[in-house]
Image (tube, grey):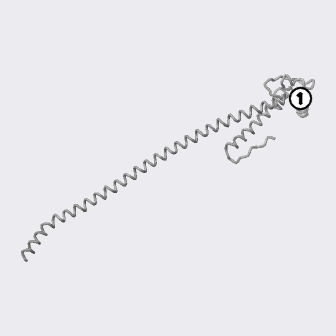
Amino acid sequence: MKIELFSKMVKEKALSEPKRKLEALNIKHAQILDDMESACEASRSEYLLGIRHKAMERKSKVIAKTHSEAQNRILKKKSALFQELKDSLVEEVKKAVSSVEYEAYFKDKLAKALKNFEALEELVIGVRIKDEKYLPEGISAHTDEGLIGGFYIIKGGSEKYDFTLDSEVDALDDYLGCMLNTLYETTGEACEDEG
């Protein structure tokens, strides 16, 4: 029995050293695996973060490009709509100038305008050739076929007072432009009423 015990002790002593080395190697191996797993997780997280960042950049670029294209389309549509409104407005004014009521309108507006001037002989009135017949005698006229209608008064050769329908159309243009901007952009700003 003593021999068996001694033999067992020698055997265990002989196996204890490799067992200890094996356990140390297992611990070291486990640590290496843990370190590799941590490094892989960190690398994976960094890689996914990079992919997410690139995707966000691409998304931002696509959104910006889409927004820019939409703004361009809106501007073109707004411009075309504004031009259409302006053209129809000018056509309506031209129709009104060709109507029988225009003579009364012209004479009334001219009479009111001339009340503001004392020396009528100093004045030159710019009109269309067709409207020259509506001017009172003794007033100098300058024909201007660029006008839609109405007249302008030049006092003393330098001061100009505009009573043309062109200026009224321009004022309406400004108002229509503001209304179109309000339609396309909800800024909350109101347009000043031209009427």
Residue 131 visible within the image: yes
Q: Secondary structure at mark 1?
A: loop
Q: Position of residue 108 (x, y in %)?
A: 90, 33
Residue 80: give x, y in percent of width and height. Answer: 68, 34
Q: Which residue is mark 1?
A: 100
- Horizontally, residue 84 falls left or right of residue 63, namely right
Q: Residue 195 versus residue 154: which sits nearer the camera?
A: 195
Q: Which x, y percent locates residue 68?
A: 58, 40
Could you classify mark 1 by the number of other residues whose Cα lies within 10 Å: few (under 14), some (14-19), or many (20 or more)?
A: few
Viewer-nearest residue: 164 or 11? 11
Q: Quadrant of the N terminus?
A: bottom left
**Amino acid under label 1?**
Val
Q: Residue at x 21, y 64 (%)?
A: 23
The vertical placement of 2 against 68, above or below, is below
- Quadrant location, the C terminus: top right
Q: Return the residue found at the far left.
A: 3
Q: Is residue 161 visible?
A: no
Q: Is residue 82 left or right of residue 194?
A: left
Tell me what residue is drawn at x 68 percent, y 47 percent: 187
Residue that appears at 49% across and 47% down: 56
Q: Quadrant of residue 154?
A: top right
Quadrant of residue 125 within the rendered picture? top right
Residue beneath the point at 27% across and 60% down:
30
Say which of 194 and 95 sits in front.
95
